[in-house]
Amino acid sequence: MPDPRPHPEDLRPATVTVSAGRPPREPDAPLNPPITMASTYVATGDVEYGRYGNPTWSAFEDVLGQLEGGRALAFSSGMAAVGTVLDLLGPAAGVVAPRHAYSGTVMALGDLESRGRGRGTLVDIADTEAVIAAMRADEDCALLWIESPTNPALELADIAALAEAAHALGVRVVVDNTFATPLLQQPLALGADIVVHSATKYLAGHSDVQLGALVVADDEVYDAVKGRRDLVGAVPGPFETWLALRGMRTLAVRLDRAQANAAELARRLEDHPAVEEVRYPGLGGIVAMVLRSGDAADVAVRQTRLWVHATSLGGVESTLERRRRWKAEAETIPDGLVRLSVGIEDVEDLWADLSQALEKG
């Protein structure tokens, strides 16, 4: 009997989040994929051992792979996925990356350099010519790392132009797509070789899962990253992966609401006397506001009652944080910059709480 499920290429992304990664439609079959709790499988199959695969992972990877237009692999965390990509580099390889990339990524590049395994060149990723010049200046450049929007400065990169230039120089391109998600941006279609996700954030969406993912289009690269995942054991738990998959079912509606809230809050913040600058590229649910000082920002983030003072993002609840409270954050990030991860609450409640906190900052 032919599978009655629609072909992925016929579906829009919001529908894929709901329909992909489902079991075959057989009588009395479960609608959702079950959680497979197994470390060992019957021999001579494709998996055999729990470090090499799990049906629950496969369901999550199916959804994300279809959304991004490649083959996905789940990891134990976003940083496990980042580390796996960096582990593919040869000795003394050069990496060009955003100066305002996620601080964990910048720290990983610093660790790579401290161990003599490579070196990072940090650039303004929004300055396309400067990025290309940095790649050309390093004859050993092997990797261009892109965030767009960057975390937390919210700068945008011209991914297509940078990917074209990188490939002309023999440089592989990685894009961290955590902020935009595949519903707003598909880097593989723009020329990227590898897409990185902290699935902890928007994909899972409920602040209860730690998970990472890589998506690639090339089979050789897929085999390399899967081989590395299998070797070091940077694998997720089946329950965490199942929760992330359940979260992805509502990604489209969550993102729509968060983005609408973010746009309205950004508009209102532009007119608030306590706010010196608002950064919102119109992509996703993250807004950055710059207050007059770090002290003012510290006071404001501690005065909210609805907004949660927390370091993560992408959940259904709204969170905020002064990023320079972390020693690893770039010194070029304004001391008073507060990153807002806008959730799905009523925007009037969010504004009432935020505006009263700003008055006290």
Image (tube, grey):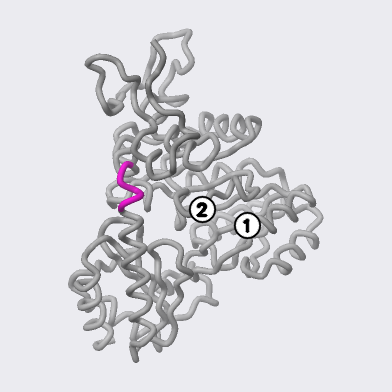
Foreground residue among 130 and 312 = 130
Q: Secondary structure at mark 2?
A: loop
Magenta stretch holds residue 166: no
Q: Between disc 2 and disc 1, whose residue precedes? A: 1
Residue at screen point 44% across, 81% down: 335
Q: Are the residues at dot 2 and dot 1 in contact (C-beta closer than 8 Å)? A: yes
Q: Which mark is residue 332?
A: none
The kind of secondary structure element at disc 1 is helix
Q: Residue at x 34, y 91 (%)?
A: 273
Is 51 located above or below residue 83 in the figure?
Answer: above
Q: Measured from the top left, where is residue 141 in percent x and y?
A: 74, 53
Instruction: Determine which quarter of the picture holds residue 312.
Output: bottom left
Q: Residue 158: percent from the left, percent from the top?
A: 63, 62
Q: How many marks on residues?
A: 2
Does residue 185 sit above or below 61 in this rendering?
below
Tell me which segment is drawn in magenta.
249-253
For residue 185, which numbered disc appears in the image?
2
